[in-house]
Image (cartoon, rainbow, N blue to C red):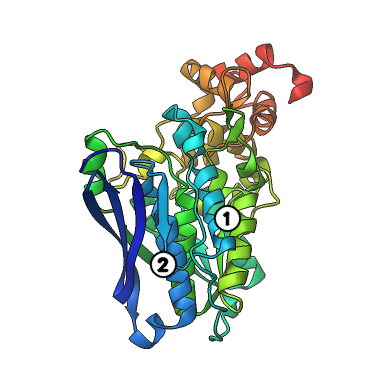
Amino acid sequence: MALPATRFTVTDRALSGRVACLGYRLEGDGEALDFVETFTLPDEVPDAVASRDDVQRALFGLHVMAGVSYWKATLAPEIVVDGLGDEDAAYFTEVWSEGLGEFFCRNEIDLARRPRFTASQAPAPATPFPLARPDEAFVLLGGGKDSAVSVEALRHAGVRAEALSVGASTWIARAAAVSGLAHTVIARRVDPQLAALNARGAHNGHVPISAILAHATLLLATVRGVGSVVASNERSASYGNVVYQGVEVNHQWSKGLRFEQLLGAWCDRHLPQGARWLSLLRPLSELHIAQCFARHPRWFDDVTSCNANFRLDGRAAPARWCGRCPKCVFVYAVTAPFLDDDGARRLFGRSFLRDPENIPMAAMLCGVEGHKPFECVGTPTEARAALFLAARHPREREGAVARWFVGAVPQGDG
């Protein structure tokens, strides 16, 4: 197919048995390329359930949201979605546009080419359907400390919870085992033609993956009648990385408060008695979450936040922590001040703050050099506060990063 395409269409969708099939089409210069993405649910869905209005609405939301991965390949100026009302057109326009901010920035694409949805018709009112069970929740597992804190908070509150993930890496499976909760997995398959299109020069890069996963998990919650899907996004997820063409770009936009608010309004329109998606840790800072996590050592041997461990092919990385990436350095910095020596060894194996090669990364995290890394890390203020504590910790204060911090960053800013 010729690039670029001029039209992107959200085509057919179906939920049959366990599998949700989502169709998309790119068209240009008289040619067309069709894609099918699938999400496989853990159990068979009876036809009577699959055809319910609330399930079809949840499926529609996932269908449109997951299309961002295919649209971004060519930035087709025309986007066609049947049955899209004004409010939903505004919703998907904002989520795709803001969630693709990093993609536009890294690829140096003019923001005038950001996606725009137009309403095709007024949606019919939602029809009555069974009330979701408010005392049951899915808790999303990511394999790291944040979701561990949510599990412990829900356990303390006596909420009946089930662990849920989209895909199951080694570390997610280990975290699920430690949680003691039943673990439910949704399998996602991206059409392999997309990778082939990327190899031919199509655009590629970061998408609002958390928004896609939110709609996938809402579909399962709607099928099951579960009242809540609980995520573990903290308040600093709303903090941006850099300004590009006058617009703030946030790697974590689809983990931020604005997306949570927009998704809540979408649920009010389409699932008025159904499941809700929320982040339990939204009011908390990264330091507060790390302090809470440090109180639960039973997790220390079985979690990691290094993204090298979370690959599309499911293979584990050679090491639990690479010790050099933004996630490793930041997570160590915010967590280490609350750990004794044994806890630090169990969780991390070694101190990442003793490595002088991590000083440039610490400078970026603290806002001294460059900009906040395009990663799921906290704000420069949180990084400075963490290193302020580390520089006074007996185990960390002689490390290269702590000594750099004392000399380079005014302590009144910590």
Q: Residue at x 24, y 43 (%)?
A: 29
Mark 2: which secondary structure? strand
137 relative position to 285: left or right: left
Nearer to me, 381 or 278: 278
Residue 375 visible? The answer is no
| 393 w.r.t. 236: above or below | above
Name the residue type under label 2.
His
Give the mark, 2 or 1, whose residue is nearer the N terminus. 1
Cβ atoms under marks 2 and 1 closer than 8 Å: no
- Across and down, in percent, residue 396 comes to 60, 25
223 relative position to 390: left or right: left
Q: CA distance from mark 2 to mark 1?
A: 35 Å
| 332 w.r.t. 195: above or below | above
Q: Residue 206: which quarter of the image?
A: top left
- Across and down, in percent, residue 333 comes to 58, 32
| 189 w.r.t. 193: above or below | below
Task: Check disc 1 and report the residue beneath it.
Answer: 90
